[in-house]
Amino acid sequence: MKKVSEVEEVSNVEDVNTQRRKLITSMALGAAAIPLSSVATPASAETTQSIKLKPNEKGPFDVVILNGRVIDPETGLDALRHVGIVGNRIAAISKDALSGSIEIDATGLIVAPGFIDLHAHGQQLPASWMQAFDGVTTALELESGVLPIDMAYKDTELEGRPINFGFGSSWAFARAMVLEKDLPPANGKMSWFQNAFNYSGWQNTLPNDEQLAEIISLVDEGVKQGGIGISINAGYAPGMGRKEYYKLAQLAKSYDIPTFTHDRYMSTLEPQSSFEALGEQIGLAAITGAHMHVCHINSVSNRDLQAGTDLLKEAQAKGLPVTVESYSYGAFSTAIGAEFMRGKDWLERFGATDYGAVELEGKPMTKQSIIDIQQSAPGTPINFHFLREDTSEADQALLDLAVLYPNGAIASDGMPWLNDKGIIEGDVWPLPDDAFAHPRSAGCFSRFINKWVVEREAISLIDGLAKTSLIPTTIIEKSVPSMKKKGRIQVGCDADITCFDYDTIKDQATFTKPNQTSSGHKYVLVNGKTIISDGQRVDIPLPGKAIKRGS
């Protein structure tokens, strides 16, 4: 790792584009991904050639970030620079010092695009702050999604968020709304979906034609209200019909938006395996042309990751519009009443033998305690260790297949924070001592940079930053054109920026004590406003903005 003072200067725009073009081409060759469509290859040689960098503005600047090592994963810029900000946008990236109303000294720090999380269930205000300390500047709820979409946006905008936010249109919400008439009306919140686990008719019941039309209509309405994509949480309702899934893919294609799917099966065993579920998803991409995004390939494929990732690479090599994400842990979090944790052989289907791999608030469970809570409180969140990457080299190698998947995004699958009173909402900070969630809710991105980039050097810093910022934008920019101005450090782009210390960036959250913010992020800016300064939260009007389809 070069020190900031040793960074080689990139002399001009032509050098920037040429260097990055060569780098990306070599990455694509290594992944056997040359034929990928633009949606599957976010930063191909052609797209890099088409980058038109704007000239610097003269100022005056509202904020300047001085003396930092500025990295832009799209152009390949990696050099000592000064950044000038006007309003919510980057206005200058200069070799020469700049002056502004507010000056941030980034000496010794990496100045990078803020991290973009496509898979964040923790949409509450305290959860947003925890992610801000992990370098996240945009957190989107796209796997589960919500309904009604307009209510979710209205309520979130009214309360405000420190980081940008957005939602997918939820098929699972729609299914429960149609098939469980005793459920209270949906309110656009994750707590409503947790309550749905107290009902058992929506997970495996096939809808009749009238019910199916109503489900699709509700999802369609969510898209019209600004839903970024179609959220298909099939793992929680594996009894969905094949025609039902097909109609969702058709709907996505009609709007030219992605689906975000938690595949219906999570098993290493045939039939009804993870491999089968991935094949179903890939098949719909081939048949309908819809962009099918695979959520958390690490937990979907679990111990069958070699077969799952090989299948996806083969599909992408044929040009199919399939994209991938992973989080940086070998343990998932879910409601204990999830369908894939039921049945006499569910543990075996995960390739496991010890019920202690399931933890409640950091403590191993037993077969009986799992059954008891499934009956009394099926919405209770638990953690399940399907890999032990910190103690097993073989398990680390499996997790690498997901985390380092070529052109795959890092996405947290971060959860709401809870205590014995339920989901923690409102302006609560710091979180109470008893607040609990999967540690990925606090440290997914910093763990990735620390473990895969800094410690193991398994991926370069610039390519790691592409996974945390640039690649997520390319996955959704057809649906949300404004995302072309995020995930980049370029003049004219949004000033969503993290300034972190390469030597100290690290996840501090653990499975027994998850309520700990990540270290190393000295400054975080969202839409040009500093929300973290010298590692401390800044109390200002919350600058996060809604990210919606078509915006």
Image (spheres, grey):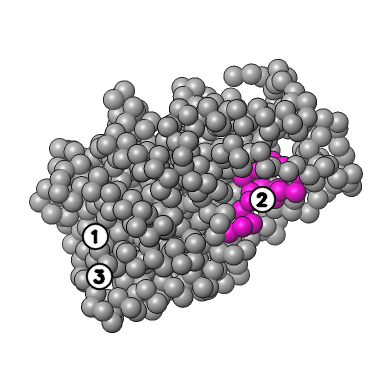
Q: What residue is drawn where x is 55% and y is 48%?
A: 474
Range of magenta residues: 480-497
What residue occupies the far left of the structure in this picture?
344
Residue under pointer 1: 238
| Residue 435 seen in the figure | no
In front here: 175 or 153? 175
**Residue 420 at x, y = what percent?**
36, 58
Q: Is residue 486 magenta?
A: yes
Tell me the residue at 31%/53% (across/down).
283
In the image, residue 547 lies at what x, y percent?
A: 59, 60
Q: What amino acid is labelled 3 in the image?
A: Trp
In this figure, which residue is indicated by the disc labeled 3? Answer: 202
Q: Is residue 202 left or right of residue 317?
A: left
Upstream in sequence: badge 3 or badge 1: 3
Residue type highlighted by circle 2 = Lys
Q: Residues within 10 Å of mark 3 (few under 14, many from 20)?
A: many
Q: Is residue 353 visible?
A: yes
Quadrant where the C terminus is found in the figure:
bottom right
Q: Residue at x 71, y 20 (%)?
A: 8
Q: Quadrant location of residue 52?
A: top right
Q: Which residue is more in the foreground, 469 or 414? A: 469
Predominant SS of the magenta segment: loop
Q: CA distance from mark 3 to mark 1?
A: 10 Å
Question: Residue 513: where, in percent of width, then height?
Answer: 41, 40
The residue that mark 2 highlights is 485
Residue lying at 86% horizontally and 32% vertically, measured from the top left:
97
Q: What kind of element bears circle 1?
A: loop
The answer to the question of whether label 1 and label 2 lie on touching residues, with beta carbons closer than 8 A, is no
Q: Nearer the viewer, residue 307 or 17?
A: 17
Secondary structure at numbered mark 2: helix
- Quarter residue 69 falls in: top right
Q: Going by the image, does 128 lie left or right of 66?
A: left
